[in-house]
Amino acid sequence: MPTSWSDSIEKAPTGGGTGATSQPSRTSYVPPHLRNRPPSADGASVSASHSGAAVGNSHQGYGGPAVSGIRSVGPWNDQSSGSSRPGGGAWNNRSNGWDRGREREANPFQHDLHTEQDLGPPENAGINFDAYEDIPVETSGRNVPPPVDTFAEIDLGEALSLNIRRCKYVKPTPVQRYTIPISMAGRDLMACAQTGSGKTAAFCFPIISGIMRNGHSGPRPPRASRMAFPLALILSPTRELSIQIHEEARKFAYQTGVRVVVAYGGAPINLQLRELERGVDILVATPGRLVDLLERARVSLQMIRYLALDEADRMLDMGFEPQIRRIVQQMDMPPPGVRQTMLFSATFPKEIQRLAADFLLDYVFLAVGRVGSSTDLIVQRVEYVHETDKRSHLMDLLHAQRANGDHRKQALTLVFVETKKGADSLEHWLCINGFPATAIHGDRTQQEREYALRSFKTGKTPILVATDVAARGLDIPHVAHVVNFDLPNDIDDYVHRIGRTGRAGKTGLATAFFNENNSSLARPLADLMQEANQEVPAWLSRFAAQSSYGRNRRGGGSGARFGGRDYRRDTSFNRGGTDLHGGGQINSGYGGAYGSAAATSAWD
DNA sequence: AAAAAAC
């Protein structure tokens, strides 16, 4: 049955749609909540939703567009036009009505089927849920909505639910179990969860569902201008990550009438402008290009009801923070409380949490243990390698790997280096030594970057040399081996890098080349490995002891836990006096595999 | 000190 999705997907639109009389062509932008109604019902729908959709909404005195329901659970059961079926009768007519854009909507699932064939049976598409069973989870904040155990418990809407099935998501991951109800309740959220844990879906489902339900609850944007008015904004720190989020979101939004557009630098802006002109509900973007679009007055943020920052700790670090503040606080975006804001990252230093609190109102803090570490899905090795021996040592690893692999094919190997120059020269050296390698870094053209990633994913060049541009968030299936040719200076970056393997419950190998240049990393690395039940070489422990000035020791031992800690719970950071965490609850099956400094780097 | 992000 998996193989038949593409068929069923292609046939689905016409499935029940006898009355799918095509709308007059060249209509202007149609808001999502009007797209899926049968033509006859349009009038009623319009008046229904403009009457406030009976959502006990307070307009909160905000001068911009009236936004209803954001802080309320109300609308879910309040569809005036729908039947009272608990499963969300209001959506039953979805496939009948507005079809103009949908006819052209490329099937986003098609692409996957092709690439999966290249890589063998899609047996891996399923997530190994056993690996998720005992993941510890902690929430804090006022009045935290309880988690769900199944997708069916939440009325996401038929079209979205169908897409979830097409994605073969049978059961929500921990981050999804908690995030979806929190987000559907309209609450702001700060979440610590590793990529690969189903984060993207966790914030996309509520956004898509919410847009389908409420559409524009405010006044329609001025039609004459060529300005786009997205309802949701998803920001990420690299272009490739934005591309990936866009691809994923498109699958979830397929045939929901919700339009997802991506904008990032290094690519022709005209194509992106054209896409924006065709209408945008969810805009996925990198900060630089978004600022450009805002300055050109081609995008307005005044209709934004959902804001999501992926890799939020990176987005708020020194390099990015001013740009993010500008976008979120100094343009026309509605303030916290009017928009809903969700921040995600695998690591959340306290300092970053304090910055991030400016963007949030009465938020829920969520920490999900790292998938994989408890089940040793990633085997971590550290080898002492002098700077001058690194290349030949890498070659030995690659040779051994090829000898052990199936059909003498090279397993996908991701090699991280420190500098862009280093990436270029290592790529070249590998190639002239008979290893099919490519490289990705910020000095390459966007075309080269995307080509390299694609060539790696498909196995055409099974070795990818990368800078930290590829360290975060990228979901590359089948990466068997991550080599830290040059170790990073920050243990968080190490955590992000090795997270490119061992994904979705599969096993992976991470090898690091360590020498004197990395002595500052010795202590946190040794701690991390120990807490992940990895074998720590004696020489590394000695390095750790020598270089331990207590400086890299984070969390002071007990406070760190598995996925971060709400800084509001720490009195030294909560001088303000307001009780931000009154109803805080610990909800944890904490098993002990996640000790203090582990990944924690950051949460204090 | 390097990397990323607009033209």
Image: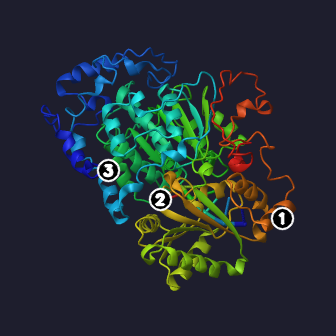
Badge 2: residue crowd in 10 Å (few <14, some 14–19, many ≥20): some
Residue A148 position (above or below residue A201): above
| Amino acid type shown at disc 2 | Ile
Instruction: Tell me the element at label 2.
Output: loop
Q: Is residue A594 left or right of residue A224?
A: right
Residue A352, horizontal then vertical, whole percent:
68, 42
Question: Residue, x 44% and y 73% (percent of image)?
Answer: A406
Instruction: Tell me the element at label 1.
Output: helix
Label 1 resides on the chain identified as A
Residue A478, horizontal then vertical, whole percent:
47, 61
Label 2 resides on the chain identified as A
- Tell me how far mark 3 sits from mark 2, CA to CA: 17 Å
- Of callouts 2 and 1, the N-terminal one: 2
Between A207 and A601, the residue placed more toward the observer is: A601
Mark toward the viewer: 1 or 3: 1
Residue A101 position (above or below residue A44): below
Question: Residue, x 54% and y 57% (percent of image)?
Answer: A502
Q: Do the numbered discs 1 and 3 sit on residues whose CB atoms are within 8 Å?
A: no
Q: Do the numbered discs 2 and 1 sit on residues whose CB atoms are within 8 Å?
A: no
Report which quarter residue A110 is drawn in: bottom left
- Tell me how far mark 1 sits from mark 3, CA to CA: 52 Å
Residue A108's mark?
A: 3
Mark toward the viewer: 3 or 2: 2
- In the rendered image, is residue A220 in sight? no
Report which quarter residue A363 is drawn in: top right
Q: Which residue is mark 1?
A: A542
Q: Which residue is mark 2?
A: A476
| Amino acid type shown at disc 1 | Arg
Between A131 and A308, the residue placed more toward the observer is: A131
